[in-house]
Amino acid sequence: MDKRIVIKVGSNVLTRQDGKLDVTRMSAIVDQIAWLRRQGYEVILVSSGAVACGRRELTVDHSLDSVEQRQLFSAVGQVKLVGLYYDLFREYGIHVGQVLTMKENFEPGEQYRNQRACMTVMLENDVLPIVNENDTVSVTELMFTDNDELSGLIAMMMEAETLVLLSNIDGIFTTHPDDPSAELIREVAPGRDLSEYIQPEKSAFGRGGMHSKYTTASRVQQSGIRVIIANGERDDILVDLFQNQENTPHTVFLTR
């Protein structure tokens, strides 16, 4: 679909050093999405941040295992997260709707068709879908690898033109970004193998890392959808990617 964009905002973009939600950055991203919609783009937002939001809301005075933490903080945090998005987008007169999904919903069949139909009718009625994994019931083997994988599946399901993965670095580099000799890889042609450049480490607050972004980007690129990896901590990154791409640091996976 021309001018349909899926934007994935990762935990490292939305989370402060203390592990709690960065509302200022969240607000800036909403401002940019509102700008994109004024330019005629349809936007689907895949947003992390529910666990960070729950951690901000709740103080727990006894120990919980990692699954219990994830379920508790995401259940509390998802309400707060979508409430914040609701308030921020309402300033622009933009209606939002929540889509909580699980990996099994992407298997061929009725659930897949229902999910696609739901998001289609939202877009047709000018409602911005905000998508996240249903962390309260998705645990262990039922989970997506991370929201990179989820956003890629959404982009393919909804036949988007572009998938934007916002991380906390500018894109894929030839070596670790902290290395002075590191060079940003600006364009990735179809079929090009970048695995030698990918570091295996994961991000501080999310489940993903550059490896998962590369895996998702390669798969989505093969389906004919352009993928951009960029730094969500940069001011006006989304505006710059679509208005001044040549001068904006990023890695783009080309479709031809």
Image (cartoon, grey):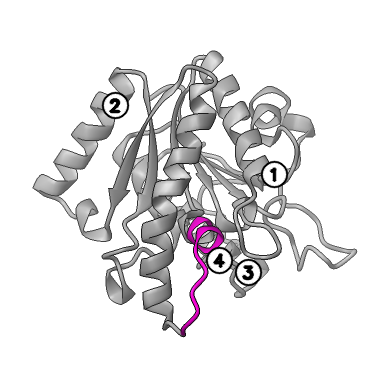
Q: Is residue 185 above or below residue 245?
A: below
Q: Label 1 is placed on what type of residue?
A: His
Which is in the foreground here, disc 2 or disc 1? 2
Report, in whole angstroms, how far the alpha carbon at label 3 lies from the one at label 4.
Answer: 14 Å
2 or 1: tag closer to the N-terminus: 2
Res 205 quadrant in image: bottom right
Name the secondary structure under disc 2.
helix
Mark earlier in primary sequence (4, 1): 4
Circles 1 and 3, Cβ within 8 Å, touching? The answer is: no
Q: CB of mark 2 within 8 Å of CB of mark 1? A: no
Residue, x 55% and y 23% (percent of image)? 34
Q: Which residue is mark 2?
A: 122
Quarter location, residue 141: bottom left
Please indicate whether residue 197 sits to the left or right of residue 81 in the image: right
- Residue 61 lies in the magenta stretch: yes
Residue pointed to by mark 1: 250
Residue 211 is marked as 4
At x 29%, y 66%, the residue is 138
Q: Nearer the viewer, residue 49 or 243?
A: 49
Local SS, label 3: loop
Can you say whether 34 is above or below 224 in the image?
above
- Residue beneath disc 3: 204
The amino acid type found where label 3 is placed reads Ala
User: Residue 57 appears at what percent x and percent y?
Assistant: 51, 58
Q: Nearer the viewer's eye, disc 1 or disc 3?
A: 3
Q: Nearer the viewer, mark 3 or mark 4?
A: 3
**Range of the magenta residues?**
53-62
